[in-house]
Image (tube, coloured by chain):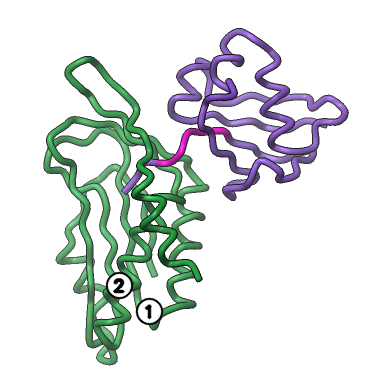
Amino acid sequence: MKVRVLYFASVREKLGKDLEEIELPAGVSTVAALRSHLRARGGLYENAFSEKSLLRAAVNQDMVQPSAAVKAGDEIAFFPPVTGG
Amino acid sequence: MKVSVQTADFDAGIEIRTISKNSAIGAVASFIGLVRDVEMTLEHYPGMTERAIGRIVEEAQGRWQVMDCTVIHRYGALRPNDQIVLVAVASAHRGDAFEACEFIMDYLKTRAPFWKKEQGAEGPRWVEAKSSDDQAAERWKG
């Protein structure tokens, strides 16, 4: 089950990439679980997704809570709290 | 209704006249956000940004009489005194126009996926979100 993951602003800079396709392991079915899975990759990911990083997420371009479901084919984005306007 | 996310500058006068043409409209309230004294770059999430602003406008239409509305938000490199954002709301009366305009702006600050990176004296840094912006959006609930 593949998902498309997008990174913006400081998350993009910490990872050095703005987009990747990820094969979700069994059991990863929420945004929070995906965040933990990414952090567990270590290195740059551990830094970008550390517990203390204040992050927001969107699934298919709607801002969601960490408990939101993720499924095959979804576009999931991670980014810091927004600062437009 | 018009939502535009663009690098180009905008002319508020033209935008306001465009949404003022219907003779049932008695009030247009507008807000323009400007860059203060730093150079900055604004990043956004193409696709989601337009969708998020569209939803905010829809929510405003559900709460107030909004006869027409234009939201323009710029991204890319911006300099001191540049215009960043325009929200203009047309209604029959000023109460609806004022409140809908402020609501759209408050929600845009907390829900539209934009990120500012300022060129400070010690190099570039991402602007941190303010809790006062969350509070401003919260007060429209309930």
Mark 1 and mark 2 lie on one chain; the one further toward the N terminus is: 1
x and y percentages locating residue A56 in the rendered image: 54, 38
Is B111 left or right of B103, judged from the image as shown? right
Is A73 left or right of B135, judged from the image as shown? right
Q: Are marks 1 and 2 in contact (CB under 8 Å)?
A: yes
Give me the chain letter of mark 1.
B
**Mark 2 residue type:** Val
Chain drawn in green? B
**Mark 1 residue type:** Val
Q: Secondary structure at mark 1?
A: loop
Residue located at (39% from left, 83% from top): B65
x and y percentages locating residue B120 in the rendered image: 20, 22
| Residue B54 magenta-highlighted | no
In the depicted view, which residue is nearer to us: B9 or A49? A49
**Whole-Å distance between the Cαs marked 1 and 2?**
7 Å
Q: Which residues are magenta?
A: A78-82
x and y percentages locating residue B23 in the rendered image: 25, 91
In the depicted view, which residue is nearer to us: B136 or A35? B136
Q: Quadrant of the N terminus of chain A?
A: top right
User: Which numbered disc covers residue B66?
Assistant: 1
In the image, residue B73 sits, relative to residue A33, either above or below, namely: below
Chain drawn in purple? A
